[in-house]
Amino acid sequence: MKDYLLYGVEDFVTDESYLRYYFRENEEDIRFWTEWIQRHPEKLDVVLSANNYIDAFAVRLSEAEFHREQQRFTESLDALDAAPRRSTRKRRLIGGAVAIIIAAVAYVAVQKSAREQEKVAMMEKYVPKGERAHITLPDGTEVTLNSDSRLTYPSKFTGEARELKLSGEAFFNVKQDQQHPFHVITSNLVVTVLGTSFNMECYPEKSHTKVALVTGKVRLDRITDIATRHIMGEALVLTPTEMGVFDKHDLSLRRTNFDPDEETGWRQGVVVFKDADFNDIEDRLDRVYNIRLVNKSHKTHFKFNGTFSDVSGEDIIKRICLSSNLSYIIDGNVITIH
């Protein structure tokens, strides 16, 4: 059984199943790899790099020629495995040499695209739990990142579109540029804007991805998988005060209105609970305040409502306990309800 989590770029490039997925040749392979990539977002950068190499080869070679070159490389690996035992050090050197060859071939293949588009370094900003951060992107776009969120973007925008990846929650005030659309990419959606301000929440563990539009106009496209960005169904275009909600379970995309405090108030330290159960409260306190909440009380069903502005996590717990006739004990960043 192959351990795909150990795969590097050269492994994906030479894997027959992955190639059938990439070229959309086999439904079973398409389904397997789509689900695998969604389950393992930590491998996305490797997958995208492999896709770039495959795409570069495919541009220069016919499909048959591409598969012949891929088969030739696979056979060389098989021959290496079948060869008499060598010392561990020597085998590592040979393996390293093979990897260098693959990298060299890939480098030659992508020279055309490299000349057309200046290669730029990718930047990454992660905001830990209990914190928020403000970023100005290279084009002048202002981004406020919520806690436990990650933004990946180029040090310089090149090409026709401005693209970045978000995991978590962020508020964007996009610098207007009619010639270069702004794309925010998640595992489920691509949000396209020209110049606008909106909030986006796309935490991986949550069942929904939400885009709340404050000004301007945005388009939401569902994608079947983030690696190939195949568009699924019709796009949803939002106008101010509208919110698009994508359901990760049934893959539906619907339009609704939103409460500004609930969706964008976090930038000013506003925390809103609406019919929140214990899991909702626990998740919010963990993310916003880095507090671990433990319930050892008799109460198992919570339905809490409240709006708080610039208060501590303990202040919220006090309010919850007061409304439910409960008590609590603090031990470091752990609060236990009794």
Image: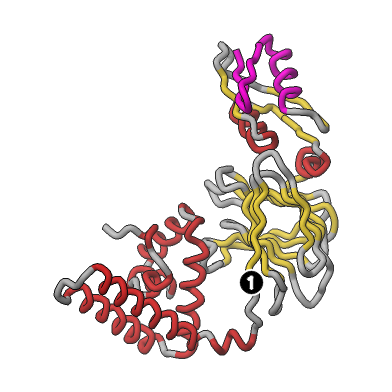
Per the image, the residue denoted by label 1 is 121
Going 62% across and 53% down the picture, which residue do you hit?
Answer: 167
Q: Secondary structure at mark 1?
A: loop
Magenta segment = 313-338
Q: Is residue 6 above or below residue 298?
A: below
Q: Disc 1 marks which amino acid?
A: Ala
Q: Is residue 98 left or right of residue 140?
A: left
The N terminus sits in image quarter = bottom left
The C terminus sits in image quarter = top right
Spot occupied by residue 22 in the image (x, y as percentages of width and height):
44, 72
Spot occupied by residue 267 in the image (x, y as percentages of width and height):
80, 44
Q: Is residue 34 left or right of residue 192?
A: left
Q: Which corner quadrant of the image does residue 161 belong to? A: bottom right
Spot occupied by residue 239 in the image (x, y as percentages of width and height):
81, 56
Q: Is residue 68 left or right of residue 195?
A: left
Q: Is residue 197 above or below residue 16?
A: above
Q: Is residue 166 above or below residue 286?
A: below
Going 64% across and 87% down the picture, which residue do you hit?
Answer: 116
Mark 1 residue crowding within 10 angstroms, few (<14) / some (14–19) / many (20+):
few
Going 51% across and 62% down the picture, which residue do you hit?
Answer: 44
Q: Which corner quadrant of the image does residue 299 belong to? A: top right
How many numbered dots are placed on residues in this image? Answer: 1
Q: Nearer the viewer, residue 76 or 39?
A: 76
Q: Is residue 123 magenta?
A: no
Q: Is residue 74 above or below residue 61?
A: above
Spot occupied by residue 205 in the image (x, y as percentages of width and height):
55, 44
State the scheme by which the image is colored.
secondary structure
Furthest residue in direction left, as rendered: 84
Q: Is residue 323 magenta?
A: yes
